[in-house]
Image: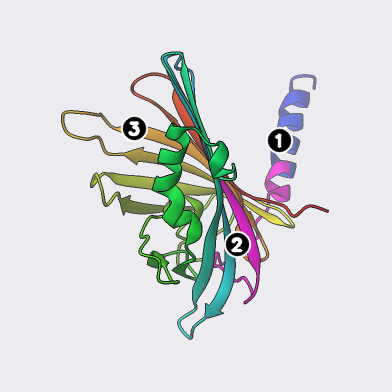
Amino acid sequence: MKIFRPIFTLFAITFLFSCSQNKEEIDLKLSPKIGDQQTIVSQVVTTGNEQMSMKSTMVVRFKVASKDDQNVFTFHTDLRYIKTETKMFGEVEKYDSTKDESLMTSDERSMHEEFKNALESNFEIRIDEKGSIVEPFHAIDGNPSTEALVDMSNIQLVFPKEKVKVGSEWKNEKTNPLTEQVTKSTYTIKDITENEIIISVAAEIDGVSGLLGKSKVDGEYILNKKDCTLLKGTLEMNLQMGGKVTNTYYKKMPKK
């Protein structure tokens, strides 16, 4: 009889786990309300390389301006501020767009000139309910700035057409318009809770001929279950020059 006890216990645990696993099916699609606002913090941090490191923070506010008959949302956006810190061979260079220009160094003012149009512009971006970018960032107030505020393709996932549940997978590809590198991503539903959807991502980025080989990216996204908007996303990639880069995107909670 003793030999059957551990077998029976293992069977019971396996049976209970399979019964308790979340089998809920959901349709992933954006559904914010007109007038909803969300402030997204985008951070890029490199670590593990003693010679060079970088930390960059951009804060962008999004407001749902409208929704058309094709379920395409128009978001009005503005860049709130930028902060960067770069360390290279012992030298440190910092920039903070909120700093008084009269107190900036010549290097800081030079960088401020590069970002000034974006900081002073109001932008618009159009995204459909499945997360595809219908029209990228563009200035709407007459300012000639055409700079992208943040990489929206990393912040906004493209959702599958079919419903998903825990364990479901789907794939997506995107091309970098500057380098023509193709990124192939596989998304997996890790968990669905009362308030959140947790998604893991594994991606491969094509190399640049003669310069860089292929790179692998791993990460995780947490979405608001109610409207599928972003709560937090993290992407990590090893750098071929040494160290790694971590991209983090998260919803900034309002102060109480």
Q: Which mark is residue 11?
A: 1
Instruction: First in sequence, mark 1 or 3: give its number.
Output: 1
Q: Amino acid at mark 3?
A: Ser
Q: Is residue 253 above or below residue 208?
A: below
Q: Which mark is residue 228?
A: 2
Seen from the viewer's position, the closer of residues 73 and 90 is: 90
Residue at (34% x, 20% y) in the render? 241
The 10 Å Cα crowd at callout 3, few under 14, some 14 to 19, many 20 or more, is some
Left or right: 229, with 72 as reference point: right
Position in image of residue 198 (x %, y %): 61, 49
Q: Check disc 3 and report the residue beneath it.
A: 215
Position in image of residue 230 (x %, y %): 59, 55
Seen from the viewer's position, the closer of residues 205 and 27 is: 205
**What element does badge 3 sit on?**
strand
Position in image of residue 114 (x %, y %): 39, 46
The Cα–Cα distance between marks 3 and 2, rounded to whole angstroms, is 28 Å
**What element does badge 2 sit on?**
loop
Q: Quarter of the image for the N terminus: give it.
A: top right
The Cα–Cα distance between marks 2 and 1, rounded to whole angstroms, is 37 Å
| Start-end of magenta stretch | 17-46
Q: Amino acid at mark 1?
A: Phe
Which residue extends farthest front? 102
